[in-house]
Image: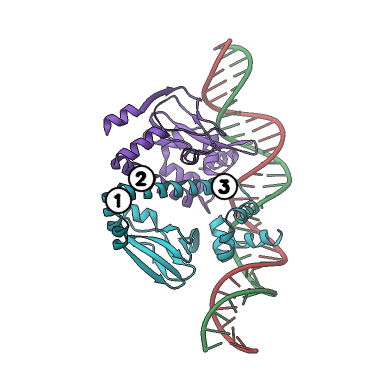
Chain colours: A purple, B cyan, C green, D red
Amino acid sequence: MQQRLLDRVTKVVLPKNEFLITEGRVCRHLYFIEQGSVRGFYNLEGKEITHWFGFENDFVTSFHSFITQEPAVENIQLMEGCVLWSISKEALEELLNEYHEAERLIRIAYEKYYIRLEERFVNAQFRTASELYENLLQRSPHIIERVPLGYIASYLGISQETLSRVRSRL
Amino acid sequence: MQQRLLDRVTKVVLPKNEFLITEGRVCRHLYFIEQGSVRGFYNLEGKEITHWFGFENDFVTSFHSFITQEPAVENIQLMEGCVLWSISKEALEELLNEYHEAERLIRIAYEKYYIRLEERFVNAQFRTASELYENLLQRSPHIIERVPLGYIASYLGISQETLSRVRSRL
DNA sequence: TATTATTTTTGACATTAATCAAAAATCTAT
DNA sequence: ATAGATTTTTGATTAATGTCAAAAATAATA
């Protein structure tokens, strides 16, 4: 399987600020981040809302678009220069058809991603701005170290000004 | 595979208000709802926060606990009398090992659940209470029809009083 | 290093929603 | 049908956060 995987995968090196996906286009690739970081964001009333980050060893794509093959509602942009591995939807599906083991790996990846998202959801509801920030500081210090404040604010679901004030009185 | 599945699955009929899972216990079963509805909730500062609902044809469990086999942080309670099909973690794993096809079905189920959750997350951030409610009215009218207001309020991440006011001025 | 652009902070104010308490409405069971 | 329990609504008040605008700090570029 290893060889078959390598045959189907492409290494991609891209500079900061490049886009992997832009809204309105159908997303045909899944990416694995070897090095660097990306953000997913969408537009809401003229503002960019960053709703997730991807770092080393994450699989990233617009999952909604990749799975349904409908146009993406989000954009994925590199926050740092990246080394990525890309696989097309078709190639991935061939792999899943051929190897039970591949299917299992992806199933387990989804499990992990599902409970990670669920956890994030639960920890976001009914929290004050400072709880959200302190929580992030504890659970994901790497985000605070590597990501501009403006992105973090919308990731937490609060305004940039509020985040700034929360930090100042910490 | 069909027969093997049926061998491993148990029909469970339970009355309203019964619990499928309570927090602190490890969740060893996955349930499929044939008839009825359930809610998942956790305790936050003495309050019950209902964070999801399950209806006919949904798979439900405390996914975090079921997947990791750590104690659950949530409770699952029947909102109506239910007809459920239950499968143990071990039985499911045997099935996944034996049949690529089973693995695939579960993988696809996770895909669906993942993007459903993601969508809910995105539609929750940066919305006013009335946007949240109108959104729910549009996307999931069955929830409003079958679920008490108090549960819906915490599902939307707002107080019951606010939800009541939103409804009155609609 | 000087200049410009970008990001972050601060201030004043408006708005939304939470909280607490009590009344009204609805549901349940005798 | 009636009494009791539960759920929902309403009112008054408070607290938290958003918004707009401008200043300060930081980073990027010539």
At x 52%, y 51%, the residue is A127
Image location (x, y in percent) of residue A115:
40, 49
Q: Is there any visible trace of residue B86 in the rendered image? A: yes
Q: Earlier in the sequence, mark 1 or mark 3?
A: 1
**C2 or A99: nearer the viewer:** A99
In the drawing, what numbered circle is on residue B123? 3
Q: CA distance from mark 1 to mark 3?
A: 34 Å
Labelled pair 1, 2 in contact (Cβ < 8 Å) = yes
Q: Residues within 10 Å of mark 2 (few under 14, many from 20)?
A: many
Left of A33 or right of it: where is B91? left
Indicate the secondary structure of the residue bearing disc 1.
helix
Q: Which quadrant of the structure image shows residue A159?
A: top right
Residue type at the position of mark 2: Arg
What residue is disc 1 on?
Answer: B96
Residue type at the position of mark 3: Asn
> Is the N terminus of chain A in the top left, top right, bottom left or bottom right quadrant?
top left
What residue is disc 2 on?
Answer: A107
Above or below for A162 versus A147: below
Image location (x, y in percent) of residue B58:
45, 58
In the drawing, what numbered circle is on residue B150? none
Q: Is there any visible trace of residue B21 in the rendered image? A: no
Above or below for A23 versus B35: above
